Image (cartoon, rainbow, N blue to C red):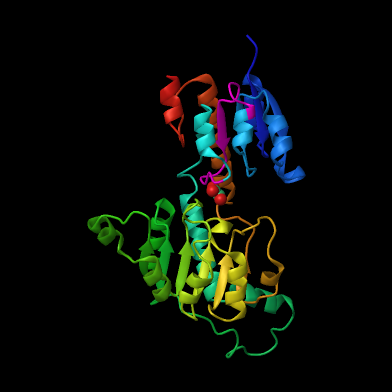
């Protein structure tokens, strides 16, 4: 019996490569060495494959249509699936999977790290010391914002947001949230969080943390009017997806001092970062590393691979995004 083909659009560990090669014909593209593939070359490489282990690249309807009948699964190495046209996948009978759960704690840790970094001016302090400027007693140096006693507003209170809430509370912060679906009152009370309309949350919180998925509804959720609504001493922290924020509007709001600062792990036109942001001392910039502990990144790759293998060779698919495809084919 001929073997199924799999296209790996990612770096993967040697042991996993050996495991996949023992079961499938494997073609691969190393994203770290050679960058993300654009639509046309991706379509060519996916063509003829039954499964794709995918990092980062956008898989649109044209790819699902071109590989209809052959492609069976796209296993995304991320929890967010905004890089995949899931409706087109479903229409073409292709299962999409993601990696929820394994990255909740490190992304929550990173959210708090960015809150602390931008509030307490950590990156500025680091640059100050490295520049050899730490020469005298620094009593009046780098005065910063409080953490304890301040309000943290979470936009998108899912698994990760709930962990951020408990971390923030352990720092003595008050936590409010805005979400598509409001939590039942008893659950919100148990978590110690209060619901706010988006507009009220923006006006109240000293720290606004974005943790919502990128969807048509959340694209540019934070633009000029929303930034103008924020407190002038507030900080915006984005660990969700870049396009949730209108990046030019953010630059303008920072220039006009409508808000006090920002900490960004994701960017609207990633991996491009708006150069105006590089110049701003009150902005902390990290390169989409919220889930990047060694353990977690390896767990994400492993979960994605287990999804792909189960979809192609049988067994329960651990974390399907469009399980209706499985029901249809069983
Ligand atoms: C990372 O950004 C993810 O969606 O897992």
In the image, taking residue 182 as reference, residue 125 lies left or right, namely right
In the image, taking residue 281 as reference, residue 260 lies left or right, namely left
Q: Where is residue 191 in the image (x, y as percent from the top left)?
A: 31, 59
Q: How many labels does the image show?
A: 0
> Residue 273 versus residue 3: which sits nearer the camera?
273
Q: Is residue 295 above or below residue 69?
A: below
Magenta stretch, overall SS: loop
Membership of 73 in magenta stretch = yes
Membership of 98 in magenta stretch = no
The answer to whether one can see residue 97 in this image is no
Magenta stretch, residue numbers: 66-82
> Residue 62 versus residue 125: which sits nearer the camera?
62
Q: Position of residue 306 (x, y in %)?
A: 53, 30
Quarter of the N terminus within the rendering: top right
Q: Where is residue 118 in the image (x, y as percent from the top left)?
A: 55, 72
Quarter of the C terminus within the rendering: top left
In the image, taking residue 184 as reference, residue 229 lies left or right, namely right
Instruction: Name which residue lies at 55% across and 40% down.
Output: 85
Instruction: Name which residue lies at 59% across and 60% down.
Output: 265
Which quadrant holds residue 187? bottom left
């Amino acid at each position: 019996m001929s073997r199924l083909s799999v296209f790996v659009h990612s770096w993967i560990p040697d042991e996993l490569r050996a495991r996949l090669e023992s079961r499938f014909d494997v073609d691969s593209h190393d994203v770290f060495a050679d960058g993300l593939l654009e639509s046309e070359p991706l379509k060519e490489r996916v063509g003829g494959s039954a499964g794709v282990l995918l990092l980062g690249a956008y898989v649109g309807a044209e790819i699902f249509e071109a590989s209809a009948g052959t492609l069976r699964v796209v296993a995304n190495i991320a929890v967010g699936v905004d890089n995949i046209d899931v409706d087109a996948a479903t229409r073409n009978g292709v299962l999409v999977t993601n990696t929820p759960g394994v990255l909740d704690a490190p992304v929550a840790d990173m959210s708090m790290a960015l809150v602390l970094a931008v509030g307490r001016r950590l990156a500025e302090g680091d640059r100050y010391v490295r520049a050899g400027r730490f020469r005298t007693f620094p009593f009046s140096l780098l005065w910063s914002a409080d953490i304890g006693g301040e309000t943290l507003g979470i936009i998108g209170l899912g698994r990760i947001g709930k962990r951020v809430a408990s971390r923030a509370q352990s720092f003595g912060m008050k936590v409010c949230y805005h979400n598509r679906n409001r939590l039942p009152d008893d659950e919100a009370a148990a978590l110690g969080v209060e619901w706010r309309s988006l507009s009220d949350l923006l006006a109240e919180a000293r720290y606004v943390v974005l943790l919502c998925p990128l969807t048509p509804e959340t694209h540019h959720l934070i633009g000029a009017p929303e930034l103008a609504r924020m407190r002038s001493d507030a900080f915006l922290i984005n660990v969700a997806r870049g396009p949730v924020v209108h990046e030019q509007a953010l630059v303008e709001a920072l220039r006009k001092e409508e808000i006090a600062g920002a900490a960004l792990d994701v960017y609207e036109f990633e991996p491009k970062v708006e150069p105006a942001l590089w110049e701003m001392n009150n902005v902390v910039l990290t390169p989409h590393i919220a889930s990047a502990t060694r353990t977690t990144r390896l767990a994400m790759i492993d979960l994605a691979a287990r999804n792909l293998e189960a979809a192609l060779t049988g067994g329960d698919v651990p974390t399907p995004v469009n399980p209706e495809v499985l029901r249809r084919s069983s």
